[in-house]
Amino acid sequence: MVTFMTLMVWDCNLEAVGHEELSKCEKLPDSGIVIGKIGREFRDGIISTKKNIDLEKETKKLLNAWYDEVKKNNISSDLPYKPAYHNFSAIVRDDSKGIGCTYTTACADGTKFVCVYDS
């Protein structure tokens, strides 16, 4: 049972920083995307390697795959962290205050997507 969870708000600054980092077409650092000397948590993925896609549909598929990690794992009530639900855990963190997501088609390996969290 959830006893405390902060409502996340959309943060255009997190979205802009995420887009700037994605547009470099490099692997994002495991330490986080740095904003003001603080590494912000993020989740990224490839939406599609195809050129002509339904962006909304493919983005929903990726976000649903992240969220559905919880269905694929037997998560106990004390919610210990496990890499198997790495993406899901970022979505439901109780200390996340803001989120900004974006995508880019500028990279050779496909349409990339990232969500940056203020947590």
Image (cartoon, rainbow, N blue to C red):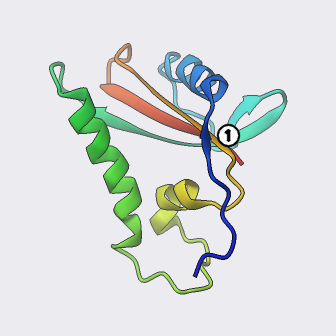
- Which residue ends up furthest to the left in the rendered image? 52
- 10 or 38: nearer the viewer: 10
Instruction: Tell me which corner region of the image, top left, top right, bottom left or bottom right, holds residue 107.
Output: top left
- Image coordinates for residue 7, horizontal then vertical, percent: 63, 52
Q: Residue at x 39, y 77 (%)?
A: 73
Q: Residue at x 30, y 25 (%)?
A: 110
Dot 1 lies on which element? Answer: loop
- Residue 60 against residue 77 in the figure, above or below: above
- Which residue ends up furthest to the top in the rendered image? 106
Residue neighbourhood size for the residue with mark 1, other residues' Cα within 10 Å, grouped as few (<14), some (14–19), many (≥20)? some
- 15 or 113: nearer the viewer: 15
How many numbered dots are placed on residues in this image? 1
- Image coordinates for residue 39, horizontal then vertical, percent: 75, 38
Tell me if 71 is positioned left or right of 9 in this view.
left
Q: Which kind of residue does numbered mark 1 sit on?
A: Gly
- Image coordinates for residue 85, horizontal then vertical, percent: 47, 65
Q: Residue at x 67, y 51 (%)?
A: 96
Tell me if 100 is positioned left or right of 41 in this view.
left
Residue linked to disc 1:
32
